[in-house]
């Protein structure tokens, strides 16, 4: 089984969820709806894939506080290799406070040790280690796309496949190196709003056809409507798993982990989408991006329920 390396930003997610309202200025609002979780696109994707049985290694930068040591222990519990996690002395890992109301949410973020991430990923030692993985998934928005375009090309020459969750950065299309990187990726993850904006289209299907390059797989996550993907085998769709949602933080990243685990096994796009949908849906049943992420046995049971 090929191993997965997930490279990207790491966050401690402090999640306040299902609040009826926000506190007024100067007011203290007390709630028991709170969760502390390891977060960030790469860690959430890594946990989702690891729980399904994939060998996973994380590339990230943490600090050296007690909270950072806690994170390292939690990653070890998930059987995620941390040899490529740099612990920067005198710093603390990034932290995000997520506050969710019934219909909306907002975030407060301290970037912490993530400011050292790009240099760490692009360092000669890390580059060399990346070739040991069968697939490298990226979850970050670099300030300069050109070095990462070169890195993806270099990995391709070493027979390593790559994917990227591009996130909400439509302005990146105009930046040097972005189009070159985009065209070199094997799998690209977007949500519906991102896909429509990147493609300047009004429907997800038109956007997907416009965004795909030969040999690529474009995945568009549609939330409660499921997901769709376009690749060399054609267009595929899969419906979502209906669950009682508690918090949607990191659901898209959990989807990525489920999708990639099946894709790396050579499964059909429909099966990849269904696995991703289950992982994303179940992650929303608990606060944070990975507390609700399923094991392989839980995923199989959920897939049976969807038939």
Image (tube, rainbow, N blue to C red):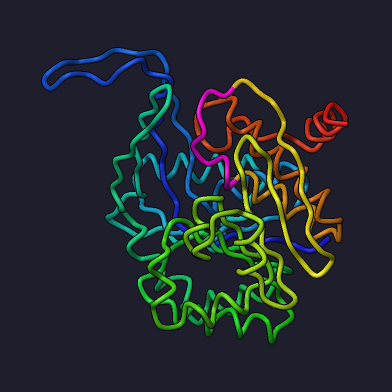
Residue at the spot x=72%, y=31% of the render?
241
Above or below: residue 143 compared with residue 153: above
The image quadrant that residue 226 belongs to is top right
Identity of the residue furthest to the left in this view: 26
The image quadrant that residue 289 belongs to is top right
Identity of the residue furthest to the front in this view: 202
Front residue of 288/252: it is 252
Residue at the spot x=50%, y=33% of the render?
288
Residues rendered magenta in the picture:
245-253
Q: What number of labels is visible?
A: 0
Position of 62 compared to 286: left or right? left
Above or below: residue 48 compared with residue 215: above
Q: Position of residue 145 (x, y in %)?
A: 43, 77
Residue at the spot x=67%, y=55% of the render?
56
Front residue of 141/8: it is 141
Q: Position of residue 207 (x, y in %)?
A: 60, 61
**Quarter of the figure with the N terminus:** bottom right
Above or below: residue 123 compared with residue 210: below
Residue 23 is one of the magenta-drawn residues: no
Q: Position of residue 223 (x, y in %)?
A: 60, 39
**Quarter of the figure with the C terminus:** top right
Position of 193 compared to 237: left or right? left
Residue at the spot x=83%, y=30% of the render?
306
Q: Position of residue 175 (x, y in %)?
A: 39, 78
**Majority secondary structure of magenta residues:** loop
Front residue of 219/127: it is 219
Position of 194 compared to 109: left or right? right
Above or below: residue 37 compared with residue 158: above
């Amino acid at each position: 089984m090929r191993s997965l390396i997930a490279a990207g930003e790491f966050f401690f997610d402090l999640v306040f969820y299902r609040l009826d309202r926000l506190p007024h200025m100067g007011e203290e609002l007390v709630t028991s709806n709170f969760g502390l979780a390891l977060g960030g696109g790469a860690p959430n994707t890594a946990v989702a894939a690891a729980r399904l049985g994939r060998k996973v290694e994380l590339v990230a930068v943490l600090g050296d506080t007690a909270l950072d040591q806690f994170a390292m222990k939690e990653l070890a519990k998930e059987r995620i290799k941390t040899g490529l996690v740099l612990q920067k002395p005198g710093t603390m890992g990034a932290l995000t406070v997520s506050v969710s109301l019934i219909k909306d949410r907002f975030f407060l973020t301290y970037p912490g040790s993530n400011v050292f991430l790009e240099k760490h990923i692009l360092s000669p030692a890390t580059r060399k280690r990346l070739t040991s993985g069968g697939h490298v998934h990226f979850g970050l928005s670099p300030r300069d796309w050109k070095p990462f375009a070169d890195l993806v090309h270099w990995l391709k020459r070493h027979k390593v496949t790559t994917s990227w969750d591009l996130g909400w950065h439509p302005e990146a299309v105009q930046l040097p190196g972005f189009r070159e990187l985009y065209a070199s990726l094997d799998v690209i993850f977007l949500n519906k709003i991102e896909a429509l904006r990147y493609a300047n289209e009004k429907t997800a299907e038109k956007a997907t056809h416009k965004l795909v390059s030969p040999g690529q797989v474009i995945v568009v996550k549609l939330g409660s409507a499921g997901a769709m993907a376009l690749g060399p085998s054609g267009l595929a769709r899969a419906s979502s798993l209906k669950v009682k949602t508690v918090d949607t933080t990191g659901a898209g990243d959990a989807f990525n982990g489920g999708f990639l685990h099946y894709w790396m096994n050579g499964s059909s796009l429909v099966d990849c989408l269904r696995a991703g949908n289950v992982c994303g849906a179940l992650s929303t049943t608990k606060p944070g991006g990975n507390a609700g992420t399923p094991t392989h046995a839980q995923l199989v049971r959920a897939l049976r329920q969807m038939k």
